[in-house]
Image: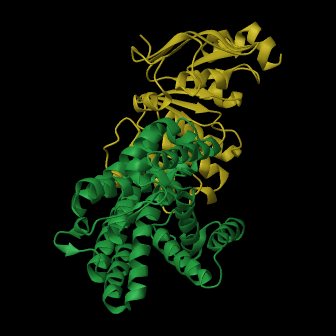
Amino acid sequence: MSRVWALHLGLLVALLAAGFLLPAYHATNLARIMVLAIFATGYNLAFGYTGLLSLGHAMFFAAGMYAAGLPAWHWGWGAAPGLVAGTLAGGAMAGLAGLLALRTAGVSFMIVTLMFAQAFALAILYFNGWTGGDEGFVIPDASRVLLGADLRQDLPRYVTAWGLFAAGLIAALALVGSRFGRVMVALRENEERARMLGIDPFAAKLRVLVISGLYAGAGGAAYALLFGYAGGSFAGIQYSILPMLYVLMGGAGTVLGGILGAGIMFYLTDLASTVTDAWLFLVGAALVVLVLFAPRGILGWVRARLWRDLP
Amino acid sequence: MSLLQGRGLTRHFGGLRAVDGVDFDLEAGTIHALIGPNGAGKTTFVSLLSGRIPVQSGTIALAGEDITRLPAHDRVRRGLAYTFQITSVFPGLSVFDNVALAVQGGTRPDRALAQAVPQALARVGMAGMQRETAGTLSYGHQRLLEVAMGLALAPRVLILDEPTQGLAAGEIAGFKALVRGLVPEVAVLLIEHNMEVVMDLAQWITVLNFGQVLARGTPDEIRANPAVQEAYLGA
């Protein structure tokens, strides 16, 4: 077990050091990657570990983004209450959606979660007088201060992104190593067998979905506060696809799969966008290649071949 | 009052009367076999008891408590364990994790896994195999793992659905000794095609045919019953 913790804590230390060593451009990229990785790590708990293939996570991400952004915009809330409100909003939204969507499974679950997310995205556009609609809104500077640190500046922004990511990563590592983490994998592998071992599948999956929603909400709130903007496009379908792509790339059902996949895809699309505007095409192509040729992802391959106990 | 009691249990699938008004009693501390020709409704019947399929009418009581409407996982937590006919372990997980899941979900979920898991494995003769991946075990070992998971639930009633299917002759002898060692702490309901195993192990036998109870009694009574001989034993 200690080797596992050494790897994960070592990576976190290296990431923190990178914020001080990297040039500003890459440090900002890495801050963005870490925020997206919070989202992806939470997605991985539902999809990779528990087998819940949701197409509605954009709703939880956007719920966090707007729960932090709207009070900042309308009422001048600060960053700390915004982060808390955003995280809770993601979890609450996931709980509500889960109560209904978890009555289904498999393809139906995908479709129901997708429908909820689309309805939520349309609601954001419909109430555009209050939400800013498609254009979105800029988070006021006064709200982008966390415990005295100005989040518009590179280093405080980086350290905040790192702190949130680190907390999420350590919590995920502890969760998947716990008794409940074993239940999550059991539900993915064989739900009927798990039920006949006294496990309530509905309750357990709802719990996972809420946890996953908390991560998505924290990611969305951090995205708004750190990068200063909230908009309707973050509730769109591509923000449900992206965490899935990150997780498939990095490794479904691995704790580090989210950050690895987010980092690789971020730089791939960054490179591609210097050549073409069609970066969504690259996302689609990567998804197809992964599903066809490398369904386990990078760390899934590492676990199968090199390090069986990698969580 | 018997430990597990069914009254008037009924389940029809369209026109098929899979289980049709069955009364059943499993006494504490006994091994009770359920036999009958293919399609007699045995697996449907134990699915009603375990809660995998809801009853259409009738009642089920475990130690006097009505469990007819309880979902399957709640019945397991109350001590009614079921092992699958087709081996159904978690193939991608280690042997330890398979048994640990049963400990966590069973009647005494707070037990320390580091002790409870090796105990359950030792009872089926699989001590020292905790680290192996369940899917890579031999078929016989997977069946034993399935039983270890049933034991790890710390059940009051253990339903074994065709446990010796696919086992070699030598393995069957070991298996009989294992099941015999479970009573009297656990009451066993055994669905079994191998008549030698049934006659050897069971104190009571219930014979199902066309979803109804054809006969019940001790092994000697069942052997001597002309209706059973005609329907099942192939006289």
Judge from the rendering whether residue B157 lies leftward or rightward of residue A241; answer left or right.
Answer: left
Colour of chain A in the rendered structure image: green
The residue at 72%/20% (across/down) is: B36
Above or below: residue A164 compared with residue B5: below
| Rendered image quadrant of residue A34 | bottom left
Judge from the rendering whether residue A302 lies leftward or rightward of residue B196; answer left or right.
Answer: left
From the viewer's side, name the closer residue of B231 and A257.
A257
The chosen color scheme is by chain
From the viewer's side, name the closer residue of B124 and A72.
A72
The residue at 39%/66% (across/down) is: A229
The reply to whether residue A309 is visible in this rendering is no
The residue at 47%/64% (across/down) is: A40
Residue farthest right in this picture:
B235
| Rendered image quadrant of residue B172 | top right
Above or below: residue B207 compared with residue B144: above
Question: Horizontal and vertical percent for residue B140?
Answer: 64, 49
Total count of labels? 0
Residue farthest left in this picture:
A148
The reply to whether residue A94 is visible in this rendering is yes
Question: Horizontal and vertical percent for residue B79?
Answer: 42, 29
The residue at 53%/35% (across/down) is: A103
Question: Horizontal and vertical percent for residue B16?
Answer: 75, 15
Question: From the image, which quarter does the C terminus of chain B lie in?
Answer: top right
Question: From the image, which quarter does the N terminus of chain B lie in?
Answer: top left
Above or below: residue A222 compared with residue A271: above
Residue farthest front in this picture:
A129
Judge from the rendering whether residue A84 lies leftward or rightward of residue A10; answer left or right.
Answer: left
Question: Horizontal and vertical percent for residue A171?
Answer: 33, 62
From the viewer's side, name the closer residue of B205 and B209.
B209
Colour of chain B in the rendered structure image: yellow
